[in-house]
Image (cartoon, helix red, strand yellow):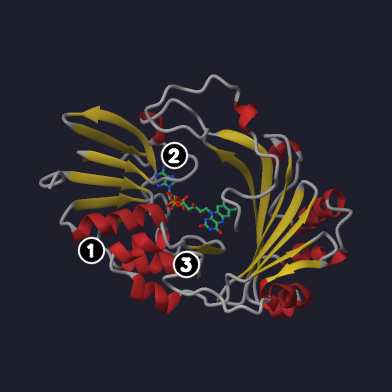
Amino acid sequence: MLLTGKKTAIIGAGPGGLTLARLLQQHGADVTIYERDADRHARQQGATLDLHEESGLRALDAAGLLDAFRAHYRPGADKLRLVDAQATIHFDQHQEEFSAPDFGHAHFRPEIDRGPLRDLLMDSLRPGTIVWNSQLQSLVPAADGWQLQFQDGQMAYADLVVGADGANSKVRARVTPLPPFFTGFTVVEGSVYEAARHVPALWELVRGGKVFALEGTQSIILSAKGDGSLAFYTCQPTAENWVQASGINFRDSAQVAAWFARDFAAWSPVWRELFTAAAYFVPRPQYCMPSISIGQPSPTLPCSATRPTSCRPTPAKA
Ligand SMILES: Cc1cc2nc3c(=O)[nH]c(=O)nc-3n(C[C@H](O)[C@H](O)[C@H](O)COP(=O)(O)OP(=O)(O)OC[C@H]3O[C@@H](n4cnc5c(N)ncnc54)[C@H](O)[C@@H]3O)c2cc1C
């Protein structure tokens, strides 16, 4: 095998890095994942992920983890309601009369909470594969491979480095000079614990699945999680520096609630309870890469020429 006798470093223990590590270990490769989180419990994992037959499910199948996935996915969590700002339902998969697709069907998109998905992937790796508290700072050529330099001063060597370190990848610059560009939209993520008690009307609306509320260029996405919490994402057009320029302290729910009441003034008051009940908020300006293949010449169009006009996180589901 090409990797025999070589050290492979994967930067980032997200779903991408963990799945690749599992697949490589199945073929006997020497793999280490370096992850910036302090440990596996360092932060709350976000909403559910939907896996598709031709990508995520295919990868889990190849990794021998489809049974573990079946044990942890959330049947029915893929059911969607499309509503408007007044929470009027326009499309409702809970009402569909035809039977929902199942495993093996091209349109089946089962949902799994990010926490259980991450756990099942981590538990499939050899002990010690993940080196926590390792935030990659830079990557410099060394011998036939790469010297990895971490924020705390630690160093490591690898023959091959894979960047699975997400949207703000430190590794990507070694592959392409193109930076990600701002899409023109900012998401504010939040989570309400014990949602049935704290936001009963919205918990009823989401019915264990998803709600996409769309109105003009604004949106709110609700996603029920298996632990009874409700993850949500607002999205609206903003300036790139909106998070700083707005002056909002996102740790102060009163300030966030005031912003929402102002900027989403035309929306039904039913949405406002999210902001009094949420345990935390994270503002996320949305960036993406120009859609070119690695190795092709840089596009000459200005980035703004590729801006999307709809307001959804990237990709569209939350
Ligand atoms: C608001 C929102 C909603 C989404 N909803 C969905 C959805 O419903 N369904 C879906 O399929 N996808 C969804 N996505 C996309 C999905 O989250 C990503 O496709 C997926 O997380 C990518 O996985 P990844 O492993 O490549 O990167 P990530 O999940 O971003 O993981 C990257 C990992 O690298 C670590 N890391 C980052 N920098 C460093 C560093 N310098 N050194 C070491 N470690 C580092 C991070 O801590 C993290 O653990 C959504 C994304 C967003 C932003």
Relative height, residue 173 to residue 156 (above, below):
above
In-front residue for pair 62/30: 62
Question: Which residue was labeled with disc 3?
Answer: 115
The disc at residue 60 is none
Three-letter amino acid code of the residue under disc 1: Arg
Does mark 2's beta carbon lie closer than 8 Å to ligand 1? yes
Q: Residues within 10 Å of mark 2 (few under 14, many from 20)?
A: some
Q: Secondary structure at mark 2?
A: loop
Residue ID at (40%, 26%): 296
Mark 1 vs mark 3: which is more N-terminal?
Answer: 3
* Mark 2 vs mark 1, CA separation in Å: 25 Å
Q: To which quarter of the image does residue 277 belong?
A: bottom right
Q: Secondary structure at mark 3?
A: helix
The image shows residue 167 at horizontal and vertical percentages of 49, 42
Residue ID at (70%, 40%): 309
The image shows residue 149 at horizontal and vertical percentages of 32, 36
Does mark 3's beta carbon lie closer than 8 Å to ligand 1? no
Q: Residues within 10 Å of mark 1 (few under 14, many from 20)?
A: few
